[in-house]
Amino acid sequence: MILRTAGFAEITTTILYSLLRLRSEVFVVEQNCVYPDLDGRDLEPGTLHVWLAEGEQVTACLRVLDEPDGAARIGRVVVAPAWRGKGLGDQLVAGALTAIGDRPVRLESQSGVTALYARHGFTVSGPDYVEDGIPHTPMFRPAPSSQPPPAGG
């Protein structure tokens, strides 16, 4: 499994098709959420796409957006059904955080997978809410340089 990161202009059409197909298959079809996935944010200059692939087949992906305050926002996190339970979510988030570097990060987790993000230093940052019939939990991870040192260290 290979982890890749790229801006929109650097993605091949084959990989772009695979990224968008996976997002559509899971978010629109599997989760039955009719929403405009192609929202224009993929094209923004600061947007970073992170994905895992076997050859040209994308198995998991997410995107990182720039926030106006300098923070990053992780979203559109998805793992193909056949690849779930194999640790791809952790690999994907770790790769995204490496690419983000020393910036604070926000995300809106589906409430059933908050433990994934907690393993990477995210904490709940607001009340749960329902979007498209799915419970979500806002989460935040401060910039690594602003985190307190570990206890006893």
Image: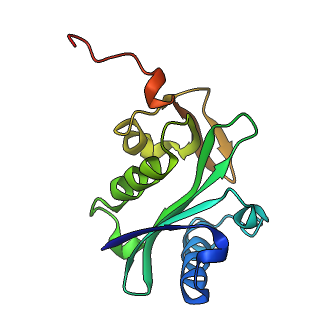
Rendering coords of residue 139 (x, y %): 54, 34
Outermost residue, top side: 152
Q: Quick check: 56 above or below 101?
A: below
Would residue 149 appear left or right of 28 to someone viewing this image? left
- Check the picture and name the quadrant holding the C terminus: top left
Quarter where residue 23 is shown? bottom right
Residue drawn at the location 63% of the way across and 37% of the way down:
71
Residue drawn at the location 54% of the way across and 76% of the way down:
22
Rendering coords of residue 62 (x, y %): 53, 61
- Check the picture and name the quadrant holding the N terminus: bottom left
Would residue 149 appear left or right of 138 to someone viewing this image? left
Q: Colour scheme of this structure image?
A: rainbow
- Towards the viewer: 82 or 51: 51
Quarter where residue 37 is shown? bottom right
Residue drawn at the location 60% of the way across and 80% of the way down:
16
Rendering coords of residue 90 (x, y %): 34, 53
Residue drawn at the location 45% of the way across and 47% of the way down:
97
Quarter where residue 70 is shown? top right
Outermost residue, left side: 152
Rendering coords of residue 18 (x, y %): 54, 82
Q: Quick check: 85 above or below 114?
A: below
- Towards the viewer: 146 or 82: 146
Q: Quick check: 44 above or below 102?
A: below
- Towards the viewer: 111 or 104: 104
- Towards the viewer: 145 or 67: 145
